[in-house]
Image (spheres, rainbow, N blue to C red):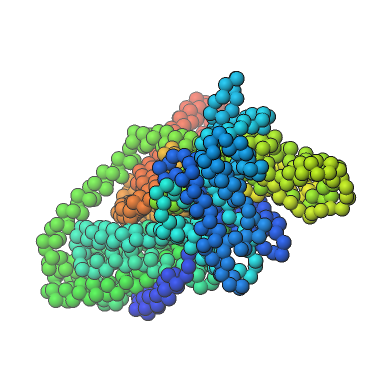
């Protein structure tokens, strides 16, 4: 069935080569034009599974506001330019300037005209005012010194002129004075446990490194997303380019800016596509010329074959990605990696096709073709080439598509997009390889055959003196008469290559060599498995950005000054009920207490709960106000509390803390409690990475096994191919773990790719080895034929892929480094397995079967001798003829 399919494909390509080439070019142009006309679209949560709790929590936060208002937050991180203290009047004056600029100078375009933050901020307009009050206190202290009795520059509470302000949500990297063992010592706030149990010392603040302004707002639904993004980008651009201060540095955290930075990271890969293409074309041209010289087939058209070997995968990507955009799918940053993958796969297939064509041409030139025409010979060689290479290319294509299709069921939108994009492009690359590249080979091959047949016709006919019929070798001798020098070189190269190949196959069939390889493989598997088991699931959002991105420094400062000391949780209580009813109030107090008594809690002082402030006010004004009414005064409220710990620097530990928050929220389901944390969309990824990776890997291996069974119905060959794929994938995971790589969404995507890519080499070797069954009697002959057919293309593909992806190491981006490292591992480990481990396993099976057969034969011979001896000893029995007859028949059967 397969042979008939590729037979018909040969007819199609030969008869309609130009039509196929023109049609594919038109489709490529249409699809490729669509790509730059489409905006790259990335949200920071695209790696988060769609069923993650963070999506529901985000929605609950949005629904908290009345009238369908949309919550939005921008953070301004202010630090000293020299990395020093922010606790100076000049630097804090600059920080207040930042506050004023963002509050009033940047306009948002609304249906009612342009408005500034202090005009649309609604309930959060005064959220940063404690910093202004704090700065006024600093100025009073600087002017009055010890006489400023109405100022208490303390932490967490600062009092200025009778106004108390909570400073812990705004200043970080804080050091304060505390009493310890009767002495006053300066410590970071993370070591100041008595802030919750003892009285805050007067003027206890000594230093802080960072000021954070929180510009939280509620947008009307009529304001467009584009207008909000423009407002955010105006702020970002100003502080990146125009803001001038010798004292402070300002970094803006905004969702739209994060998206643009992720997009910029992806676009940084595009120039390296051009570099990779040039490298691939150069290498392909060189390797094609080397093989052509060896087979006496050197011609200028090899340059075109090299060019289209690399252009065809890009054409498939243009049509595939453009088609996805036409049907409404988004163009995510991670798809910038897809062309590198398709280029590696497509070039591998092209190498197989060119090598098969050259081998077939070399064979046909030694036959008598005087009854054939150039067109009939072109059809013959094209069909034979496709029949030989098509099935193995089909195996790798189906398994790759299956691998990516299985991964497409992942809940993470970005991994879904990556998997679908790769599956579509791999499938189109297979189609284009047979049609587009096949058409190029036909067009160039037609010219090559026309010249060959012209030379055959111009040479005098050579007769064989001893035979009347034409010698099949005459045609070859007539062609080689023109290229005598090339023929001499070719014979020399061919002889050397054949001897080396034969020696190589005999070496891999040697018992001692096979045993050594098996021992090395066993050690390798132990190391790889150990590495795979020790890999840690971790997440660092800064890895999504280029190293020169402002977010790299921002996340580093956040990791140093905020996360270990003051990680804030927003707790939304959406069904508080009657807070004046004692039992209900007790339930709320109990819930708050549970959040405040977690092991990593900063403590009660970090909790910003309006009810406590109100209780204090009520006690001062009229003591019974709290229980004066049974009617509810509100329908929902929010409070915050903070957590600390050096272990929170690891995102996996923060994910554990988030789970504890959610467990408490579930305990108080009667209050309808929702916990929101700005990083929860990242933290939800961590729990799913390991199970998702294992599930995708197992399902992919299962699908590959099923596909391989259909194409290679030979148990031992199938076992060898499956073992090689598993071993290669395990080696990739293990090596990445041993070099310190953590399991994150980028590595998840790369492992999906590596599993699919690890199929290529084993599939080609296994299929061709299986095809030798019945044609060769020994494993050495079978290996020699297999390696002669696919060995050189595998070496070509491996070297070209290594050269191509090595350019990605020059991009200062985690994604490019991970994908390049993974592809290098797959290529190197896969090539070693294909050229050494698989032949050794084939030889091992042969040696074991020979040993088993020799042992069985020896046993049968021993049994035969024993039976024969028994027969001789019974010749004098009363029924000699019958017994002898039975023994004789038994001996014949055993032998």
Q: Position of residue 233 (x, y in %)?
A: 49, 62
Residue at image position (33%, 64%) is 309
Q: Is residue 699 above or below residue 460?
A: above
Q: Position of residue 554 (x, y in %)?
A: 48, 48
The answer to which image quadrant residue 768 occupies is bottom left
Q: Position of residue 131 (x, y in %)?
A: 57, 47
Q: Is residue 372 above or below residue 464?
A: below
Residue at image position (62%, 30%) is 201
Viewer can see residue 276: yes
Residue closer to the observer: 513 or 352? 352
* Residue closest to the far top: 181
Image-based side of 720 in relation to 127, left or right? left
Residue at image position (22%, 61%) is 289
Q: Is residue 246 above or below residue 226?
A: above
Viewer can see residue 561: no
The answer to which image quadrant residue 587 occupies is top right
Q: Is residue 626 above or below residue 8?
A: above
- Quadrant in which the C terminus is drawn: top left
The answer to which image quadrant residue 467 occupies is bottom left
- Number of labels in the image equals 0
Residue at image position (76%, 41%) is 616
Image-based side of 214 in relation to 783, left or right? right
Residue closer to the observer: 99 or 29? 99
Residue closer to the observer: 529 or 421? 421
Residue closer to the observer: 145 or 362? 145
Image-based side of 427 in relation to 200, left or right? left
């Amino acid at each position: 069935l397969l042979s008939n399919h590729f037979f018909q494909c040969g007819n199609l390509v030969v008869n309609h080569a130009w039509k196929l080439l023109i049609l594919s070019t038109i489709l490529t142009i249409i699809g490729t034009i669509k790509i730059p006309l489409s905006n790259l679209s990335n949200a920071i949560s695209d790696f988060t599974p769609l069923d993650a709790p963070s999506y529901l929590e985000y929605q609950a936060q949005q629904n908290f506001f009345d009238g369908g208002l949309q919550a939005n937050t921008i953070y301004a991180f202010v630090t000293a330019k020299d990395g020093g203290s922010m606790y100076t009047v000049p630097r804090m004056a600059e920080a207040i300037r930042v506050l004023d600029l963002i509050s009033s100078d940047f306009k948002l375009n609304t249906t009612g005209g342009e408005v500034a933050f202090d005009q649309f901020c609604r309930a959060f307009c005064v959220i940063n005012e404690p910093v202004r009050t704090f700065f006024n206190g600093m100025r009073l202290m600087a002017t009055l010194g010890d006489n400023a009795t109405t100022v208490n520059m303390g932490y967490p509470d600062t009092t200025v002129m009778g106004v108390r302000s909570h400073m812990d949500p705004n200043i970080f990297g804080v050091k304060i004075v505390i009493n310890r063992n009767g002495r006053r010592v300066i410590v970071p706030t993370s070591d100041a446990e008595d802030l919750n149990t003892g009285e805050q010392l007067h003027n206890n603040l000594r230093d802080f490194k960072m000021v954070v302004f929180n510009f939280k707002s509620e947008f009307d639904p009529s304001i467009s997303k584009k207008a909000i993004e423009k407002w955010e980008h105006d702020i970002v651009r100003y502080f990146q380019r125009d803001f001038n201060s010798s004292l402070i540095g300002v970094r803006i955290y905004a969702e739209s800016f994060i998206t643009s930075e992720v997009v910029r990271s992806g676009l940084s890969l595009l120039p390296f596509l051009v570099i990779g293409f040039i490298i691939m074309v150069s290498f392909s041209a060189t390797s094609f010329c080397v093989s052509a010289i060896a087979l006496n087939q050197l011609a200028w058209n090899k340059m075109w074959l090299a060019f289209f070997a690399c252009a065809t995968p890009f054409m498939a990507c243009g049509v595939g990605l453009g088609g996805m955009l036409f049907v409404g799918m988004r163009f995510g940053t991670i798809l910038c990696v897809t062309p590198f993958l398709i280029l590696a796969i497509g070039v591998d297939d092209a190498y197989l096709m060119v090598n098969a064509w050259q081998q077939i041409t070399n064979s046909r030139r030694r036959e008598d073709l005087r009854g054939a025409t150039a067109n009939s010979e072109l059809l013959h060689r094209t069909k034979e080439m496709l029949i030989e290479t098509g099935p193995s290319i089909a195996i790798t294509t189906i398994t790759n598509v299956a691998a990516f299709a299985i991964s497409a069921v992942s809940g993470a939108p970005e991994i879904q997009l990556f998997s679908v994009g790769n599956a579509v492009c791999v499938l189109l690359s297979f189609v284009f390889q047979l049609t587009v590249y096949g058409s190029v080979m036909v067009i160039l091959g037609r010219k090559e055959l026309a010249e060959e047949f012209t030379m055959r016709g111009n040479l005098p006919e050579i007769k064989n003196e001893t035979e009347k019929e034409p010698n099949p070798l005459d045609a070859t001798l007539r062609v080689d008469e023109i290229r005598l020098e090339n023929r001499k070189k070719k014979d020399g190269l061919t002889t050397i290559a054949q001897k080396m190949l034969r020696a190589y196959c005999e070496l891999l069939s040697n018992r001692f060599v096979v045993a050594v390889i098996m021992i090395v493989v066993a050690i390798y598997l132990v190391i790889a498995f150990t590495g795979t088991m020790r890999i840690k699931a971790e997440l660092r959002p800064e890895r999504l950005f280029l190293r020169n991105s402002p977010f790299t420094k921002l996340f580093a400062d956040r990791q140093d000054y905020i996360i270990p000391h003051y990680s804030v949780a927003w707790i939304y209580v959406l069904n508080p009920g009657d807070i004046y009813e004692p039992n209900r109030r007790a339930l709320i107090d109990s819930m708050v207490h549970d959040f405040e008594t977690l092991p990593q809690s900063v403590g009660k002082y970090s909790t910003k709960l309006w009810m406590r402030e109100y209780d204090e006010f009520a006690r001062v004004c009229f003591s019974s106000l709290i229980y004066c009414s049974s009617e509810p005064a509100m329908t929902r409220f929010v409070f915050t509390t903070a957590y600390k710990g050096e272990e929170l620097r690891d995102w996996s530990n923060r994910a554990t803390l988030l789970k504890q928050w959610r467990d408490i929220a579930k305990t108080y389901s009667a209050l309808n409690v929702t916990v929101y944390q700005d990083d929860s969309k990242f933290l939800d990824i961590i729990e799913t990475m390991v199970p998702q990776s294992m599930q995708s890997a197992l399902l992919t291996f299962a699908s590959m096994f099923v596909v391989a069974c259909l194409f290679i119905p030979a148990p031992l060959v199938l076992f060898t191919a499956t073992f090689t794929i598993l071993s290669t994938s395990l080696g990739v995971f293990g090596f990445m773990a041993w070099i310190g790589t953590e399991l994150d969404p980028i590595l998840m995507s790369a492992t999906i790719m590596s599993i699919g890519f690890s199929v290529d080499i084993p599939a080609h070797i296994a299929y061709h080895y299986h095809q030798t069954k019945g044609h060769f009697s020994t494993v050495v002959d079978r290996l020699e034929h297999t390696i002669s057919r696919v060995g050189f293309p595998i070496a070509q593909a491996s070297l070209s892929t290594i050269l191509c992806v090595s350019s990605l190491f020059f991009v200062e981006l985690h994604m490019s480094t991970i994908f390049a490292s993974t592809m290098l591992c797959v290529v190197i480990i896969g090539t070693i397995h294909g050229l050494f481990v698989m032949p050794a396993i084939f030889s091992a099976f042969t040696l074991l079967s020979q040993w088993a057969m020799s042992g069985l034969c020896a046993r049968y011979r021993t049994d035969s001798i024993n039976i024969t001896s028994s027969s001789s000893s019974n010749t004098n029995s009363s029924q000699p003829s019958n017994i002898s007859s039975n023994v004789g028949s038994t001996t014949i059967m055993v032998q």
